[in-house]
Image (cartoon, rainbow, N blue to C red):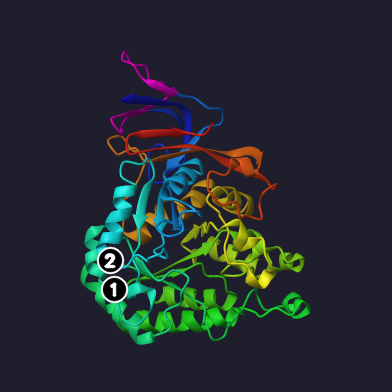
Amino acid sequence: MKTIIIRNAKIVDKNSDFHNSINDVMIEDGIIKQISSEISINQPFYEVEIDNLHISPGWIDLHVRFGEPGFENRETITSGLNEAAKSGFTGVVLMPSTNPPIDTKSGIEFFNKKSFSNVVDLYPTGCISKYHKQTEISEMYDMFQSGAVAFTDDKKTIQNSMLLNIALEYVKSFNGLIMTNCVDPHMSYEGQVDENINSVKMGINTIPEVSEDIIVDRDISLLKYTNSRLHLSTISSYNALKKIKKAKSENLNLTVDVAAYNLILNTNLIKDFDTNVKLLPPLRSEETRLFLIDSIIDGTIDAVSSDHTPLEFEDKNCEFNLAKFGMIGLKTLFPILNKVLGKKIELHQIIKLISQNPRKILNLPENSIKIGKKANLTLFDPQKKWKYEERDICSLSKNTPFIGSNFEGISLGVYNNSKLFLND
């Protein structure tokens, strides 16, 4: 249907003149044509009317992994995009840690073709280093020309400072973005969990917060030296955030995100050896968890990601030290934010963390609910209570500690690329 009318929707978009108003929104051929209290037209249209419907600019997740190519049994691009649409995302940023890793323009073009015309925009990233081996930089400009939105070696920390320095200098010529993971592999050798009393009692090797602090220090120093663009991914350390706050006060081109699970879970959960809470970065202390939330409120943290990492059953149904890091997280990202931030900041500020701010980080065009603009929308109900069941998961993998958890706030559908997707 060319024309869609969304009825009685509360608009959540601080950049729109219609922010916080309840209106009908008419979309024609993918463009917002009219916003008013009651729209009536004499042509065929499809109507969307849902109780307590809210709409916002489409949500974007800064960190997802889909497996394909190489790990299709964990997640294909199709299953991953379906999970994203069902979770309220109109865009996802795909990490390049596939098999083979994405380090050439042909890899970027592969993703563009696989996701062409989907309701969810797939934003691919390319590796910083060739073959993901951290010996020389990849052909980043070629990948940028083909559509790569950033460059990262994903969870592999760049150990070679000169390599990172060269990468930061190189992307300046086309205003590219470097994303880094901040864990010193020597300070966290064979680490499994945060360093605390529980890890001592369990006799498990650790990933202490100081291992993150060291790399954050190094990366900020290189950013100052190169005057480039840098994004620090899934930060989880108390002191690292203090360093980041200071660096931001110096007007460096620095942005930061945090994984949603670090905002709601703490390291006490590892006592049961539940492999679903073996994550990277690991769960931290309650003090650090609360400080992460405070750092969102004061603006030190720019965005929140799901860090969606699908894994096979065998990768989690094993001994704790043999289990792989990660959990799926698209479906629970907004509900987690709603739970931990809903009484601390306004709804539009929560949405900004997964909509406007990720777009700014990636240097994408502004998305707003305005007449004449392309319709890129997330439909959601921030008050609906629901229980997360395994049957809710479209992902091929089910590795999450949240099955059986009760949440408030859920996505209802998305509209993007002249397509409407509604949850059942």
Residue 97 x %, y %:
42, 65
Dot 1: within a 10 Å radius of its alpha carbon, few (fewer than 14), some, or many (20 or more) residues? many
Instruction: Look at the image and tell me whether residue 227 can be seen.
Output: no
Q: In this image, 193 relative to 334: left or right?
A: right
Label whose residue precedes the other's in the sequence (1 or 2):
2
Q: Which mark is residue 138?
A: 1
- Residue 405 lies left or right of residue 228; in this view the side is right
Span shown in magenta: 26-47
Query: Alpha-carbon neighbours of circle 2 within 10 Å: few (<14), some, or many (≥20)?
Result: many
Q: Give the answer, above or below, for where 295 lies relative to 147.
A: below
Query: Helix, strand, or loop for circle 1?
Result: loop
Residue 407: which quarter of the image? Answer: top right
Image coords of residue 203 (percent x, y): 74, 80
Provide the secondary structure element on which disc 2 rests: loop
Residue at which label 2 appears: 104
Say if 384 sits above or below 222 in the image: above
Residue 235 seen in the current view? yes
What's the residue type where badge 1 is placed? Ser
- Tell me the quarter of the picture where residue 362 sits: bottom left
Q: Position of residue 104 (x, y in %)?
A: 27, 66
Where is 413 relative to 1, above or below?
A: below
Amino acid type of disc 2?
Answer: Thr
In the shown orientation, is residue 88 left or right of residue 284? Answer: left
1 and 2 marks in contact (CB < 8 Å): yes
> Going 39% across and 25% down the picture, which residue do you hit?
5
Q: Residue 222 location, x and y as percent?
A: 37, 83
